[in-house]
Every structure is written in structure tokens, then in C-alpha cells.
Amino acid sequence: TMVDRRCPREELRAELFVPESLGHLLERVTCDCADLDTDAVLAALRARGVRRVVVVAKHLCGLGTDLALRWMEALGRREEVELVGCVVATCCVHKIAKADFSNFVEWYRPAYEASGTLAGSSLESLLSLCCRFATWRTTANSATAVTTEDQVRLAEAFEDVIQHP
């Protein structure tokens, strides 16, 4: 089962290029990952005789990566399938919409508080700042960089919080 927010152009639709003998294993669902119905996905997998699943998530803007990880966590608790792995290519932290800040803060506050990083700073203000400078990792050392050392320090602390076990 492939999930896309919008159906890609025909030349990018993998299901059109697999051998006929494997075509029955593929299905494309068009929806936002926040609305992904685990029971419907499991039903589609059952109908195709699929019991082992590898999830590949790429370019999930904003909270998309977090939503996908939470969905995989829920899927992994189900007995109908075995989640054998996942590949996640993160993207676009700077696209976390203001409306999604509250979800993000709720999900990460425990890790943020446990880390003790940047005591006295609010997670909301840190998120707001880091979203504006999300490209810092690739541009901070360029000749024309406008990212300051303090912004790099904050961005690294922000990443530490998100990656906290």
C-alpha cells in the first residue's frame, strides 16, 4: 500500500511499472498521513496476503514525519502484520504550520524537559526560531551564510531534543 497526499504524475507511479506478477500487491491510497486509517490499510494488506511490512516514508513536510512514526508505532502493535523495518527521509521541518505547533509541543515536551537543554527557554519559542532556520545544517558554513553561531547552537539543541530516546 502506497500513501500519497496527492497522486503523483503517471511517470512517478511505481505501480504502473512493476511486473504484472507483482501488481496485485500494490495499492495507492491518497490521503494525508494524519488521516491514515490503520484498519483500512490492514484490510488491504490482508486482501493481498501480505503479512510482513516495510514502511518507506519520504519528504513528509511539517509534522508528516512525526505522524508517520506514530502510525508505524501503532501498526507495530498490531498482530495482523509484522513491521519488519522502515526507512524515513525527513523533510521540511520549516513547514510546521503554526496550527500544528500545539501538537508538536505536546508530543515533544517530555523529551525537551527531560533533556534539560536550554533551561528557561520555551519549547514553543525554540520551535518557532528553528522552523525559520531549518536549512542551517546545509547553509551555516557557506560563504554567504546569514545563520549565526547562536542559531546553530539552538538548532543543534533542538535536534538533540527531537532525537532524545
Image (cartoon, rainbow, N blue to C red):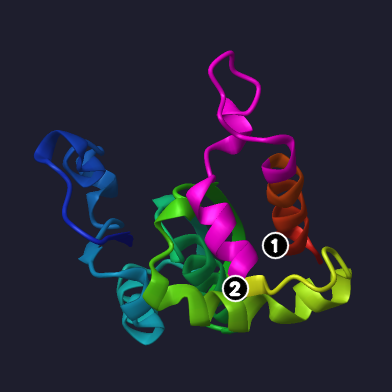
Disc 2: CA contacts within 10 A as few (<14), some (14-19) or many (>=20): some
Give the residue displayed 70% in from the left and 79% down from the top.
109
What distance separates the C-alpha of mark 2 from that of mark 1? 13 Å
Q: Which secondary structure lies at badge 1?
A: helix
Which residues lie in the magenta part? Answer: 125-151
x and y, in percent, of residue 99 in the image: 38, 77
Q: Examine the rendering and report whether any part of residue 57 can be seen.
A: no
The foreground one among 48 and 127 is 127
x and y, in percent, of residue 101 in the image: 49, 75
The foreground one among 55 and 25 is 55
Q: Is residue 143 found left or right of 9 in the rendered image?
A: right
Give the image quarter of residue 61.
Answer: bottom left
x and y, in percent, of residue 94 in the image: 46, 52
Which residue type does callout 1 highlight? Ile
Q: Which residue is mark 1?
A: 162
Q: Is residue 66 found left or right of 28 in the rendered image?
A: right
Disc 1: CA contacts within 10 A as few (<14), some (14-19) or many (>=20): some
Give the residue furthest to the left: 10
Q: Which residue is mark 2?
A: 124
The quarter of the rendered structure image containing the C terminus is bottom right
Give the residue displayed 57% in from the left and 57% down from the top.
129
